[in-house]
């Protein structure tokens, strides 16, 4: 089944990507899901400090 999530390309240094892969493996996630999780955590923290972000969906 195709994903409904739009593709997004991210360029990051190889060393950082390897570290993300390491952490993802420890958390039993793919690197992509680990990055998604980290972004979600960052946004939640930002919204706790600054209020909800309003976006059109």
Image (cartoon, rainbow, N blue to C red):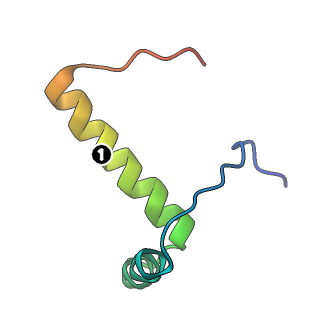
- Indicate left or right for 30 with 51 as reference: right
In the image, residue 12 lies at what x, y percent?
50, 66
Q: Is residue 33 above or below residue 49?
A: below
On the rendered image, what quadrant is the N terminus found in? bottom right
Q: Residue furthest left?
A: 49
Q: Residues within 10 Å of mark 1 (few under 14, many from 20)?
A: few
- Indicate left or right for 11 with 52 as reference: right
Q: Residue at x 25, y 28 (%)?
A: 47
Q: Is residue 22 above or below residue 57?
A: below
In the image, residue 22 lies at what x, y percent?
41, 85
In the image, residue 4 lies at what x, y percent?
74, 42
Q: Residue at x 52, y 63 (%)?
A: 33
Q: Nearer the viewer, residue 9 or 49?
A: 9
Q: Residue at x 76, y 50 (%)?
A: 3
Q: Nearer the viewer, residue 1 or 19?
A: 19
**Residue 28 picture quarter:** bottom left
On the rendered image, what quadrant is the C terminus found in? top right
- Indicate left or right for 47 with 7 as reference: left
Q: Residue at x 47, y 80 (%)?
A: 21
Tell me how many marks there are. 1
* Residue to which mark 1 is pinned: 42
In the image, residue 14 lies at what x, y percent?
50, 79
Which element is circle 1 on?
A: helix
């Amino acid at each position: 089944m195709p994903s409904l999530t739009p593709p997004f390309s991210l360029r990051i240094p190889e060393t950082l990507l390897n570290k993300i892969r390491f952490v993802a493996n420890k958390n039993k996630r793919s690197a992509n899901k680990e990055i998604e999780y980290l972004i979600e955590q960052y946004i939640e923290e930002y919204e706790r400090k600054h209020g909800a972000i309003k976006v059109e969906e």
